[in-house]
Image (tube, rainbow, N blue to C red):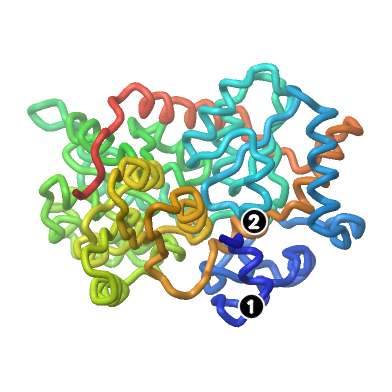
Amino acid sequence: MPSVDAIIRSAPGESCAPELAEGPWTLDLGTPGYGPGSSMGDVIPTGSPRQGQLPLEYQHASNDQLNERIRAAKQLLGSRAVVLGHFYQRDEVVQHADFLGDSFQLANAAQTVPDAEAIIFCGVHFMAETADILAKPGQAVILPNLAAGCSMADMADIDSVEDCWEQLAEVYGTAPDAAGRVPIIPVTYMNSSAALKDFCGRNGGIVCTSSNAATVLEWAFERGQRVLFFPDQHLGRNTAKAMGIPVELMPMWNPHKPLGGNAGSDVLDAKVILWHGFCSVHKRFTVAQIEAARAAHVGVRVIVHPECPMAVVDAADEAGSTDYIRKAVAAATEPTTFAIGTEINMVNRLAAEYPQHRIFCLDPVICPCSTMYRIHPGYLAWVLEGLVRGEVINQISVPADVATGARVALERMLAVRPAATPVVA
Ligand code: SF4
């Protein structure tokens, strides 16, 4: 099966944005934005990192030339550098990865290579921050293209969350109940800035992933009467609903409105307050797509990511993290038709890896994650050859005072038992 990149280049009209067929460096010096792809309609916050121009020699090199340069640089660097590739990266980058995984698996993978002086994170900004927080002293974490942010992570900023927290303290007070549970516990999804992880560390909170969100919420409810969940409303809602919490007790917090746009009584009754954030990749999946898949393929097994809207998760057969989806496909012993609701690069890779199954993306339009797509082999060759010359390009460094609290919140997550089951089955 051709890669997503090859499909887009041969028929750009079949994608959500024909500009995807161009090199991502065409955007580096233009209007700041997430670029073409799923999150191109989202608003990028001011102050987001800007990528300077990629040197022309990398822009003009063919894919074969870039592959050769990447391989040669990796060989020269040996164990001094490790390349991490997220499941949602294009195949042209993933083929050079020493480890492939989701954000947390990759952050853990980085810890298994203590000899590496440089960790090249082919993912997005918050992932590189997490790797830096967990890295050994002296290890440099590199993001090949600084414009590879995450539109969902950028939907919750530290000032808005601090402001929300102050307003909630006025409503709830700070005194624990008779069982010793504090009024509210902050829980941040891994897909958030280091500043928000630090906020959770400083305020008795914790980090979760899409694999362990239910376990983390249980941990939070043992210690608090309610949860403030950010930035992804869908993961929070889908997880809490599967745990039996009524959706009426999950008001949404809009940071641009007083009390998040809620009546005081709704905030008082809340069990989970959901931040107004979402992933533009997973927001594209619809119930109509599931109905079309069921009509076209009798017996199709529909698996979606819990970042999808609640109606989509409810209409699917199963919902789970990228790791869950991979394991579900790998465990199918009979030839099966799978319709999958997650990023297109991962779905196409699964289809190529498991030819005994029919595997397709629920969304018929090719629309990769805009920001993951900003990492191109040209940027990977550039940072690797920089390391060969002794130059560290695009290092991501989390300030020590932020890293301390963030590490506390991450370590709390590591101490809780990981969820073995999907969010909804
Ligand atoms: S897929 Fe969604 S959550 Fe993941 S990096 Fe892209 S925008 Fe962010």
Q: Can residue 53 be seen in this view?
A: no
Q: Where is residue 49 in the image (x, y as percent from the top left)?
A: 68, 53
Q: Which residue is farthest bottom? A: 13
The disc at residue 12 is 1
Quadrant in which residue 373 is drawn: bottom right
> How dense is the environment of label 1, judged by Cα within 10 Å: few (below 14), some, or many (20 and up)?
some
Nearest the eye: 134 or 23: 23
Q: Where is residue 302 in the image (x, y as percent from the top left)?
A: 28, 60
> How dense is the environment of label 2, judged by Cα within 10 Å: few (below 14), some, or many (20 and up)?
some
Q: Residue at x 60, y 62 (%)?
A: 2
In the rendered structure, which disc, 2 or 1, sits on the residue that comes first in sequence?
1
Q: Can residue 336 be seen in this view?
A: yes
Q: Does residue 91 appear left or right of residue 157 in this picture?
A: right
Q: Residue at x 58, y 33 (%)?
A: 131
Q: Where is residue 108 in the image (x, y as percent from the top left)?
A: 51, 28
Q: Quadrant of the N terminus?
A: bottom right
Q: Nearer the viewer, mark 2 or mark 1?
A: 1
Quadrant in which residue 3 is drawn: bottom right
Which amino acid does the dot numbered 2 rest on? Ser
Name the residue beneath numbered marker 2: 48
Q: Position of residue 84 (x, y in %)?
A: 62, 37
Q: Does residue 15 appear left or right of residue 311 in this picture?
A: right
Alpha carbon separation for disc pair 2 and 1: 28 Å
Nearest the eye: 288 or 392: 288
**Up-down relation of residue 205 to residue 148 (above or below):** above
Q: Does residue 262 appear left or right of residue 404 in this picture?
A: left
